[in-house]
Amino acid sequence: TSDDFPKSDGMELTYDERAGNGGGSNSKASATKIIKTARISLETREFDAHVRHVRQQAEDMGGYISDSYVDGKAPEYYDDNGRYASITVRVPQERMESFLSDTRGLATVINESIGGDDITFAYSDTEKRLEIYTSQRERILALLETAENVEDIIELETELSRLTYEIEDLTSSLRGWDDLVDYATVTVEINELPPSTPATGPDDMGTRIREGWQGSLNGITVFFQGLAVFLIGASPVLLILAVLAVIIIAFARRYSRKRRARREQSGAAFTAGGPYADTGRAGAKRQKNTPAYGAPAAEEKRDGDPNETGNE
């Protein structure tokens, strides 16, 4: 009946009361659960060989590669940068130290770290919740077999669906933790070193000169290609600027010609008429009674004017 239906308040019962027959703690709950991780960085000039060794060693120890990443290219000269590899390995936890010891012997270790995450309490709590939900699910199933009221059946089925979802979610969490605990996660970083000395050989100087020449030509080619791309891309703006420049130059030339013409006219008039070269009858009269500008003044007669003598 509906009175026998385990309400949500019933969920507050203790674990031992709800677990029922033989519902004691699982033996796994008392075990320590630690997720172990490690990271180690190496430097080597035998990049390819050591990358292959790490991958093979993971398989030999019962593990597997969960992630792998390689970047860069092999160095050709002593001042080139080498390649970089990051390999994430999952190995059984009890063999993690053995794997790290083998990895340390490959090359120079530049960095190493080991960590652990204790999830014992969370794991134990999740196990207990799972047992409670499992026990309650069994009681719901038993009640469904005797239920006759439609309303009770609906409520029981709703609670059964909820419990089933919780059980699946907790089971998935426990499985994920089991995998992380059983298999340690080790990240191996391998940095490739360039050759210790410059390459030597009869063609070394010529090769480097040729490569330098080729690099210069490539640089020139790239420059002109970039210039062409810029000019084509900016052609609308450049066209407008060119039109404006033509208009400004045309106006400047026209103004210069007019100014030069005014100067020439003014100079000609000044030369022809002297300082009295102006227009109108007054100017003509002054010009008539005044010697031409620049002409030598007439020498006065020493004997005097006859008319003036008579007057005297």
Image: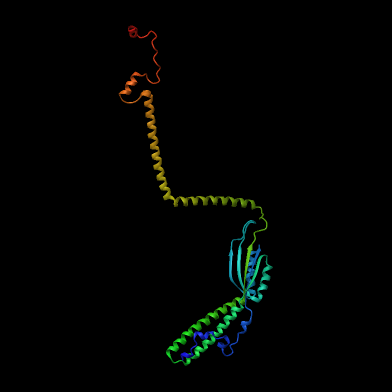
Residue 279 in the image: above or below residue 104: above
Residue at screen point 46% across, 84% down: 158
> Residue 115, position in %: x, y?
64, 71
Q: Quadrant of residue 248?
A: top left
Q: Quadrant of residue 279?
A: top left
> Residue 7, position in %: x, y?
49, 86
Q: Quadrant of residue 121?
A: bottom right
Does residue 270 appear left or right of residue 127 in this picture? left
Residue at screen point 58% across, 68% down: 68
- Residue 203 visible in this rendered orientation of the protein: no
> Residue 20, position in %: x, y?
56, 89
- Residue 15 visible in this rendered orientation of the protein: yes
For the C terminus, which image quadrant? top left
What colouring style does the render use?
rainbow
> Residue 97, position in %: x, y?
67, 73
Number of numbered discs overlaid on the protein picture: 0
Query: Residue placed farthest to the front in the image?
Result: 312
Does residue 61 appear left or right of residue 148 in this picture? right
Please state which of residues 219 and 156 is positioned toward the viewer in this rendering: 156
Please state which of residues 71 and 186 is positioned toward the viewer in this rendering: 186
Residue 8 in the image: above or below residue 278: below
